[in-house]
Amino acid sequence: MAEPPLLESLGAVTALFISILILSAVGRQATRKSFQKRTFLFSLILLITAIVSNILLTLYIKGPGSDPSQALITTKRVQGTFDLLFAISIGIFVLATAKPEIDSWKAFLDHLKKQFPNPFLFYGFVQVLAIAVLWMSEPRPITVGTATRIEFPSIFLFTGGLAFVTVMTYVPFMLLTYIRKVQPRPSVKRDVYLIIAGVLGYTILEFVVEVVLPYYAIDVRAGGFIVEMGLVGLVAFAVREKGFLEDLLVPQAEAALSTAPSFQLRRGFTYLVLEENPAHAFEIFRDLVTHGAEGLCITRKPPKMVAQDYGLERTPILWLSRVANQKNCVRPSPPENVAMAVEHFISVGENPVVLLDGFEYLVSHNDFQSILALLHDLNENVSIRDSILLVPLDPKALNEREFALIKREVQVIEAPDGPRMGPRVELEYPKVTRKGRGS
């Protein structure tokens, strides 16, 4: 076999380097949303395989005894198949991102059944149809001097063009609609734009390099490989943060049980739960999130422990900690860290409830006036957003004056003594008018 050209060898080395970069970037993400992670990882593997296989087949074309024209057609078919499979898998990732309830293949199939017909079915059907036509149609290679011109059948151009258009519309539409709803932090928005640019850039370049230019007997695949790998690297850069997928999640209810909730709380209020141990507050919180409320738990306990103890699989849990460095940690100082997390959550949720466990911890790491100001701000945002904020507190942790100032801003719930046994408990709303709301 003839020695491969320098540019094609460089493309092969670049493909290997970027593939390692991408797989490590996605693999290191610490997210509980494993379905999104697996589909995204599979999409990137297909994309890498498409480029590497094209490089290998290109080198094979230059080998002795091969029919250059037919080998060239084979590379087009293999490359196109991987590209279209990539489009399908990235479409699944986009759908799972836009619909957080899709957290498994079973949930994905249930969604397709319940939402029939839906845009993804059309999107996926077009990609599968394009794969079938790709292998059934017969492109015609025409030798033009030392180059080869390829004429594609009209049916292939139609289905391939339709697949191209669906990717160019479906991916940005779903992701942009989603981030408008979620309103993530600016860095996450930027990374979403980079993913869109990488996917669309790759799609456009593939269409030009593999369909348009071959019609004019122009073969720039070797250079195209390098540019395409750069676009793959753009996607890898966008998901470099360990918690990127976690940042793209909207609030969702833990469950929607048909039974009546045990606790009835009016929305738009902050509730102070008086207890030494936050067990009763967690009991109220779990009751609400399993009856349709979208919950956020900020706690001093390790999130894995909370999730196991209270059966919280979908509810986001943030660890209030000064030393932990996981993605789902919130530092106690400055208190604006907690404020931003709560305010963002209740601004995007439809039926939000927040449990802030660790009020005493916040006081110990900040001055009391700043924590009182934090409670003022949260109280007002909870009222504006018609949300619920639960704050368990041991009254003995504060002096009499501090406790009096806190009580002026909240509704008070006294936890029952000992474990609660027996029938449903109704919480009575305080009859006093709250102060600090302009009343």
Image: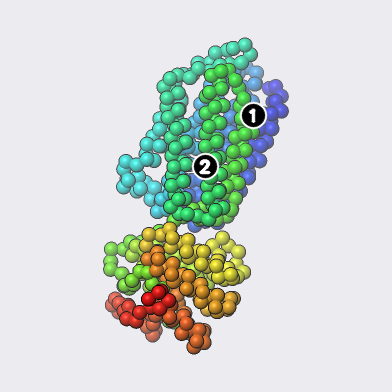
Residue at mark 1: 223
Left or right: residue 352 compared with residue 230:
left
Q: Position of residue 221 (x, y in %)?
A: 61, 27
Front: mark 1 or 2: 2
Q: Which of 95 and 334 lies nearest the eye of the viewer?
A: 334
Local packing at callout 2 (Cα closer than 10 Å; few below 14, some 14-19, many 20+) is many
Q: Quadrant of residue 264?
A: bottom left
Q: Position of residue 430 (x, y in %)?
A: 34, 80
> Where 178 sits versus 148, above or below?
below
Type of amino acid at the residue the image marks with label 1: Gly
The answer to whether residue 7 is visible is yes
Q: What separation in Å lies between label 1 and label 2 (alpha carbons)?
A: 22 Å
Q: Which of 107 and 121 lies nearest the eye of the viewer?
A: 121
Type of amino acid at the residue the image marks with label 2: Ile
Q: Residue at x 63, y 45 (%)?
A: 21
Residue at mark 2: 196
Between disc 1 and disc 2, whose residue precedes? 2
Q: Which of 90 and 403 lies nearest the eye of the viewer?
A: 403
